[in-house]
Structures are given as structure tokens and as C-alpha cells.
Image (cartoon, helix red, strand yellow):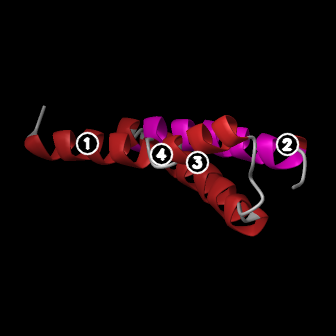
Amino acid sequence: MHWTEYFGYVGAFLSAVTFMPQVWQAWKTKSVGDLSLGTMSIVFISVVVWLVYGFYLNLIPVIIANLIVGLLSIVLLYFKFTFPKK
């Protein structure tokens, strides 16, 4: 593996964990009142676009990162619609 591929995997890992603290905090507090539905919608749409791009060019780091970010985005959107409003 070329050294640049390692950068791709490190970048994918860092991108993938971006929302983990937010998901944990939302789950722990059962509060997502400050979470922007617009921002989360844009994130989800960008994930779909990146996945199409990653699959088309067979870019494994891009695919992995965006699958994880997409899953975490779905979790946050689920929280947004199911946690009680405060």
C-alpha cells in the first residue's frame, strides 16, 4: 500500500468519527433541540453524493467514511424526530 493510501484511511477514520460525540451526547441527554435539521439534511445528501462517487471510482476510504457518517446521520435524524421536545 502506498503511503498516500494510509492518508486516505486516516482521513476516512477521522471523517467517520466526526458525529460520534454528537450521537453519544444526544443519546445520553435525550436532547437534540439545538441540532439543526437543515444541517443534518445537507450532511445526509452530501453522504449520498460521496457514496455514488466512491462506488463509481471504487475509493474504499471514501465509501467506508461515508457509510459510517451516513449511519450516524440517520441515527441523529431519528433522535431528532423521536426525542421529546424540551
| Three-letter amino acid code at the position of disc 3 | Val
| Three-letter amino acid code at the position of disc 2 | Phe
Residue 66 can be seen in this image: no
- Circle on res. 10: 1
- Circle on res. 54: 4
Between marks 3 and 2, how big is the CA–CA gap? Answer: 31 Å
| Three-letter amino acid code at the position of disc 4 | Gly
- Circle on res. 83: 2
Q: Using the image, determine if residue 11 lies above or below residue 67.
A: below
The part of the image, by quadrant, that contains residue 5 is top left
Q: Is residue 72 magenta?
A: yes
Point out the stretch of residues depicted in magenta: 62-81
| Depth check, front residue: 32 or 78 | 32
Between marks 2 and 4, how big is the CA–CA gap? Answer: 33 Å
| Depth check, front residue: 86 or 10 | 86
| Dot 2 crowding, Cα within 10 Å, few <14, some 14–19, many 20+ | some
- Circle on res. 52: 3
Image x and y of residue 79, in percent? 78, 42
Which numbered mark, 2 or 4, is in the foreground of this view? 2
Q: Quadrant of the C terminus?
A: bottom right
Answer with left or right where residue 17 lies relative to residue 5. right
Residue found at x 72% / y 63%: 34
